[in-house]
Amino acid sequence: MMKIDTIVDLRLAVAGWRAAGERVALVPTMGNLHAGHLQLVERARTHADRVVVSVFVNPMQFTDASGGGGDFERYPRSFDEDNTRLSAMASAPDAVFSPTVAEVYPGGFESETRVSVPDISDILCGEYRPGHFVGVATVVAKLFNMVQPDVALFGEKDFQQLQVIRRFVTDLCFPVEIIGVPTVREKNGLAMSSRNQYLSASERENAAVLYQMLLTAQQKIVSGEEAFSDIQTQAIARLSDAGFRPEYFEIRQSENLQPASATDSQIVILVAAWLGKARLIDNLTVNLSIN
């Protein structure tokens, strides 16, 4: 497993694979890897001959990155442990690309050219984290140009992020196949996330309520309940009663994330809520066309 930290060395490695006619997959991460990330790597190996995992904590997607001391500074970094976990995998990646901020944003990220995806970037998480998805889209676009992968894999836990990436790949004609991989969960249903480590033991146990509310809403929709606004209101109240600070609980159309109705067949239920110091997000999809 090669460890690469410059674009020049990365492109040299990829050029060699390309010359051999090999297919390349990219798994973008911000490090602090858990079982969900490792599943992305395993799936990537089934789609390509060569796999690159990027590890880069992207300052542009943190609204407080310029000032320091906020979520960007606190974001957990465990590069040595990440490399150990990756190298121990039976399907270990061929390369780990871990550039510095200066390598990715040589002119400073504040004045960098940006990728903005309208309509779906300023709602849901985008409403509470202004500019976040501009940062996500920009860094992923840069990684695509650096690695030039045939395929890239992303976890479905970050459903809005996945849709933002799919949209700009289509709109900007990137020759990259985007594959979403199902969420990996802990035994109590909590979606695995690097931010789960902010939870205390009691909070981690209580966090299962988030998934339970998604399951409840999913069952109501499948059973034919059409008052989606009531489902959302009831879920918000239940989360608040359980000690969460909900930001949203929304039932949306899967493709464009616009408000859904009972006449829609492809639906996603999305939630974001704080529990203690951790901001948790999760989702479940509903396919009414098969019912």
Image: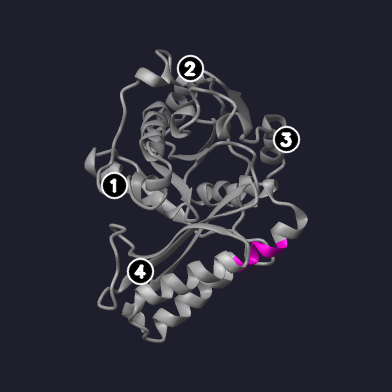
Front-most of 211 and 92? 211
> Residue 167, which numbered label?
1
Magenta stretch bounds: 205-209
Q: Secondary structure at mark 1?
A: helix
Find disc 4 in the rendering and name its residue: 267
Q: Are marks 3 and 4 in contact (CB under 8 Å)?
A: no
Q: CA distance from mark 2 to mark 3?
A: 22 Å
Residue at the image position 47 percent from the left and 74 percent from the top:
234
Find disc 3 in the rendering and name its residue: 81
Query: Is residue 57 shown left or right of residue 61?
Result: right
Q: CA distance from mark 1 to mark 2?
A: 26 Å
Quarter of image, res 72: top right
> Residue 103, which numbered label?
2
Q: CA distance from mark 1 to mark 4?
A: 17 Å
Front disc: 1 or 4: 4
Q: Earlier in the sequence, mark 1 or mark 3?
A: 3
- The residue carrying pointer 4 sits among few (fewer than 14), some (14 to 19) or many (20 or more) residues within 10 Å by Cα, namely many
Q: CA distance from mark 3 to mark 4?
A: 38 Å
Front-most of 130 and 34? 130
